[in-house]
């Protein structure tokens, strides 16, 4: 024998604590959070506005992401190209993003040029001009992207899935960047109005992470953001409706998007999920890891390692301010579409029907606890996580409570989370693939009401 | 702002295994990255896709590790892992909490030493199906998914090892046998064809002791290195090659492929900076002209894939808007490329390209996994891990003249393959 048979035992873990921080408010209410990360000279700064695409009016769906993209298209001082050039000369990258829950403007910049980087952030957020010509171009690009999404089986499946799960009054039913009908009507004025509604320093937080030993972050922030006042049109967004019609039904809804000749079928099975702020967050995390998060999760083990149906299968909750979707996902070769769907349903049923094994519980807890320090190696990762706490209004010690809370999750808690939150009996099943190849077999299984849509969105002429 | 020097130790075990260790105690994390000097270029006709299929088999167990247990042990220890196969090499890597490094080293040693003890037809068949679904998911069922295969097949002649893509063909995957796996393992998977790098919160002396302990008993393969056929090529394609590809895509897209200097040649560094100036973000020439000003394209890209044998590939694409005249798009794209060969870039453009390159390098090297990957890469491909410290100065030393010269050599009409993807109506 040329190798050593005995498995090594782990050494003594080095302690890891998520870095401490506090939120300091400037006179105008703008929060500043500074996280000192010694040795990290490439600093990450992010200004977070806790309202996102879910807070926009239905008729203007897509305006938040369009506005965020347009922020750097020109300011009172500089054209878009001059902004890019100024950023590049700093060796920095400036980015503005919008998601369902928040808008953020961020910069990654060497610590010695942080002041100049913050100048650029302040400029794009306080003095954008939203040139019509450029906003028109960005709108056209989004419309073309909508065409591209229809032709991409994965994006088609994701869009078809939320369209099936949510009712029409729920923003999560649509893509966060809007639909053809809404995007076509968006203008530079709409971007300006949206920023006015969101511009309120008391609801903004600047988060800066990196080697800040010699930097007065609060002073730098006060000089640039301290004199900002809320826009006269600023408003406080209300609750986000997140409702599904599936639960009121007594059967599943199977929606098939027919793509003739498709060599794979994209499968999504799921339903309305959960918001981020829930009491059983840690139990849900462990349960999701066992069901569809770990490499050896039940879904991946069954569909990939046992059956060879797919390159990968997973499941998880998209936890947002309101209830985001829960979905199990995979892509399988066309011939095994129906058996793969049955296997997935079986795993969704099994997770709540009996206790997980001690080995499964240990594997999931050990992974989530052990991988925790790996998630926070760099300033952008640390800053992004703190941004998440701010957006969801979670306690500042949430991340330091994480590991003990995961350790404390029991078999009973996993079972309870599965029973409460996984509902295969009234799930939506979305299949994007060659229906001619699997429809008779699908019908024979009696999985629920089947709706078939011929996916004719592949060419610009007849795209939706 | 200077990129910090990466200090490392570099030695060889008696069985030929190269060990590189770089300590960094900032975060209690360490990366293990093992490169083998074998890639899809070692495959022969009728056996394409094999190096990559083999990479999957490496996760199916060895003498003391069960099927899928590699992942279970790494994830259970709070680590992440994967492997990747490319034309010139294959690698396997783990990022672990630092007190779990020994486990990763043991796992890597066990499969290097004893993979064949656990090999079964059942596991091979299972991973063959997984890989075929990977091919369907990543290439066959994806819009424009055939571009890489088509460009390689056009830029490299049929007998050249880079003619076929790493994923291989369905027919060849179907034909792969247990004997193929055994022969491949016995030839290529030996300590004298591998570099193991450990970067992070570790102690170099301890790592050396563990590597001696776990890998020291694995015998070298005296039949290495494998001698590949001559891979040299004329520097240019020798004529333009065009293909129109009807596909289920909503927008036309044009791909360009060009032969470029081999990886490691300083001219490729200059070409990388040219790529930054042409298509590196919103301030680049192609983005400004095609996307912003003339509005011919939805997006545009240009980059080089560095290969060590014969030629690298510089590839670019532009997605047309629905109303765009494709000839006009192609003309504008090509005009910008040729202009770089005609006139020097401005001092300001060069300065910005250098600053961006420096920032990219700094950002990438913050992570222990990236540092480990680079050290293994430079050791495997160039026998020179210290390139990790010299590559940025090399980029920063590139002049406007260097860029002009290499662009004049590479961006020539007789050196281009052009694929035009056009929408085809649904049946």
Image (cartoon, coloured by chain):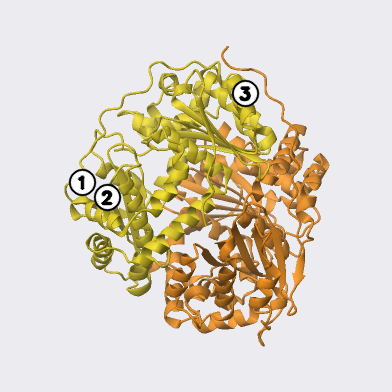
Chain colours: A orange, B yellow
Evaluate whether label 3 is on the same chain as label 2.
yes
Viewer-closest of B308 and B416 = B308
Mark 1 sits on what residue?
Answer: B237
Q: Chain of mark 3?
A: B
Mark 2 sits on what residue?
Answer: B258
* Mark 2, secondary structure of its residue: strand
Mark 3 sits on what residue?
Answer: B209
Left or right: B341, with A233 as reference point: left
Viewer-closest of A345 and B90 = B90
Tell which circle, 1 or 3, labels the residue nearer the N-terminal end.
Answer: 3
Evaluate whether label 2 is on the same chain as label 1.
yes
Circle 1 crowding by C-alpha within 10 Å: few under 14, some 14–19, many from 20 = many
* Mark 3, secondary structure of its residue: helix
How far is the residue under mark 3 from the one under mark 2? Answer: 47 Å
Q: Chain of mark 1?
A: B
Of the 4 image quadrants, the one containing the C terminus of chain B is: bottom left
User: At 24% from the left edge and 61% from the top edge, which residue is drawn?
Assistant: B338
Circles 2 and 1, Cβ within 8 Å, touching? The answer is: yes
Q: Is residue B29 above or below residue B358?
A: above
């Amino acid at each position: 024998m040329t190798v050593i048979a005995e498995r090594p035992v782990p050494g003594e873990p080095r302690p890891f604590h998520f870095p401490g921080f506090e939120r300091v408010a400037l006179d105008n209410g703008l929060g500043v959070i500074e996280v000192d990360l010694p040795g990290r000279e490439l600093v990450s700064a992010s200004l977070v506005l806790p309202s996102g695409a879910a807070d926009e009016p239905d008729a203007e769906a897509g305006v938040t992401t369009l506005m965020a993209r347009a922020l750097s298209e020109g300011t009172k001082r500089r054209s878009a190209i001059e902004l890019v050039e100024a950023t590049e000369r700093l060796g920095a990258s400036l980015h503005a993003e919008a998601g369902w829950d928040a808008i953020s403007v961020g910069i990654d910049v060497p610590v010695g040029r942080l002041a100049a980087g913050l100048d650029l952030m302040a400029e794009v957020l306080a003095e954008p001009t939203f040139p019509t010509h450029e906003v028109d171009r960005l709108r056209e690009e989004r419309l073309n992207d909508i065409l591209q999404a229809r032709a991409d089986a994965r994006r088609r499946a994701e869009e078809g899935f939320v369209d099936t799960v949510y009712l029409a009054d729920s923003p999560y039913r649509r893509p966060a960047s809007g639909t053809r009908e809404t995007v076509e009507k968006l203008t530079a004025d709409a971007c300006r109005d949206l920023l006015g509604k969101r511009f309120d320093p008391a609801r903004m937080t600047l988060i800066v992470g990196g080697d800040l030993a010699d930097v007065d972050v609060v002073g730098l922030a006060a000089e640039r953001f301290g004199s900002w006042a809320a826009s006269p049109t600023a408003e406080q967004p209300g609750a986000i409706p997140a409702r599904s019609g599936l639960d009121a039904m007594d059967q599943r809804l199977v929606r098939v998007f027919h793509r003739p000749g498709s060599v794979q079928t994209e499968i999504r099975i799921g339903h309305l999920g959960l918001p981020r702020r829930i009491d059983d967050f840690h139990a849900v995390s462990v349960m999701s890891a066992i069901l569809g998060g770990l490499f050896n999760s039940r879904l991946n083990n069954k569909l990939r390692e046992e059956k060879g149906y797919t390159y990968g299968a997973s499941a998880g909750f998209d936890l947002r301010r309101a209830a985001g979707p829960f979905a199990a996902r995979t892509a399988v070769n066309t011939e095994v579409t129906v058996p793969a769907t049955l296997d997935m349903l079986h795993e969704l049923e099994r997770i709540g029907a009996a206790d997980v094994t001690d080995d499964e519980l240990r594997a999931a807890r050990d992974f989530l606890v052990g991988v925790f320090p790996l998630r926070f190696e760099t300033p952008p990762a640390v800053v992004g996580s703190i941004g998440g706490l701010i957006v969801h209004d979670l306690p500042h010690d949430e991340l330091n409570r994480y590991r003990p809370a995961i350790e404390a999750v029991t078999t009973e808690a996993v079972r309870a989370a599965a029973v409460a939150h996984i509902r295969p009996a009234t799930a939506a099943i979305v299949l994007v693939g060659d229906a001619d190849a699997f429809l008779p077999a699908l019908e024979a299984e009696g999985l629920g009401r089947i709706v078939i849509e011929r996916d004719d969105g592949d060419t610009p002429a007849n795209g939706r | 702002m200077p990129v910090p020097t990466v200090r490392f130790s570099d030695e060889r075990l008696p069985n030929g295994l190269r060990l590189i260790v770089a300590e960094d105690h900032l975060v209690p994390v360490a990366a293990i990255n093992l490169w083998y000097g074998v890639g899809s270029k070692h495959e022969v006709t009728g056996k394409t896709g094999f190096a990559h299929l083999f990479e999957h088999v490496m996760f199916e167990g060895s003498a003391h590790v069960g099927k899928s247990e590699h992942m279970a042990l790494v994830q259970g220890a709070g680590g992440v892992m994967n492997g990747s196969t490319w034309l010139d090499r294959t690698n396997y890597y783990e990022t672990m909490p630092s007190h779990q490094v020994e486990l990763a080293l043991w796992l890597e040693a066990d499969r290097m030493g004893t993979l064949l003890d656990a090999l079964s037809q059942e596991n091979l068949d299972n991973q063959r199906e997984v890989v075929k679904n990977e091919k369907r998911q990543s290439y066959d069922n994806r819009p424009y998914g055939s571009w890489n295969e088509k460009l390689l097949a056009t830029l490299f002649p049929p007998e050249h090892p880079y003619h076929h893509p790493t994923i291989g063909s369905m027919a060849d995957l179907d034909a792969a046998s247990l004997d193929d796996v055994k022969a491949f393992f016995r030839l290529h998977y030996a300590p004298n064809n591998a570099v193991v790098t450990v970067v992070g919160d570790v102690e170099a002396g301890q790592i050396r002791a563990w590597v001696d302990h776990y890998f020291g008993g694995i015998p070298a393969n005296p039949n290495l290195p494998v001698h590949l056929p001559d891979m040299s090529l004329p520097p240019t394609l020798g004529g333009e090659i065009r293909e129109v590809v009807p596909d289920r895509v909503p927008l036309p897209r044009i791909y360009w492929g060009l032969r470029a200097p081999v990886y490691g040649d300083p001219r490729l560094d200059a070409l990388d900076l040219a790529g930054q100036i042409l298509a590196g973000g919103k301030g680049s020439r192609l983005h400004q002209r095609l996307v912003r000003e003339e509005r011919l394209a939805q997006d545009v890209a240009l980059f080089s894939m560095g290969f060590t044998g014969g030629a690298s590939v510089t590839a670019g694409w532009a997605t047309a808007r629905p109303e765009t005249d494709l000839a006009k798009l192609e003309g504008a794209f090509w005009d910008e490329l040729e202009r770089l060969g005609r006139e020097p870039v401005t001092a300001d453009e060069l300065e910005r390209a250098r600053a961006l390159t420096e920032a990219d390098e700094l950002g990438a090297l913050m992570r222990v996994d990236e540092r480990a990957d680079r050290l293994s890469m430079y050791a495997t491909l160039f026998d020179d891990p210290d390139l990790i410290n010299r590559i940025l100065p090399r980029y920063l030393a590139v002049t406007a003249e260097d860029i002009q010269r290499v662009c004049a050599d590479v961006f020539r009409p007789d050196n281009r393959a052009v694929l035009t993807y056009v929408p085809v109506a649904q049946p």
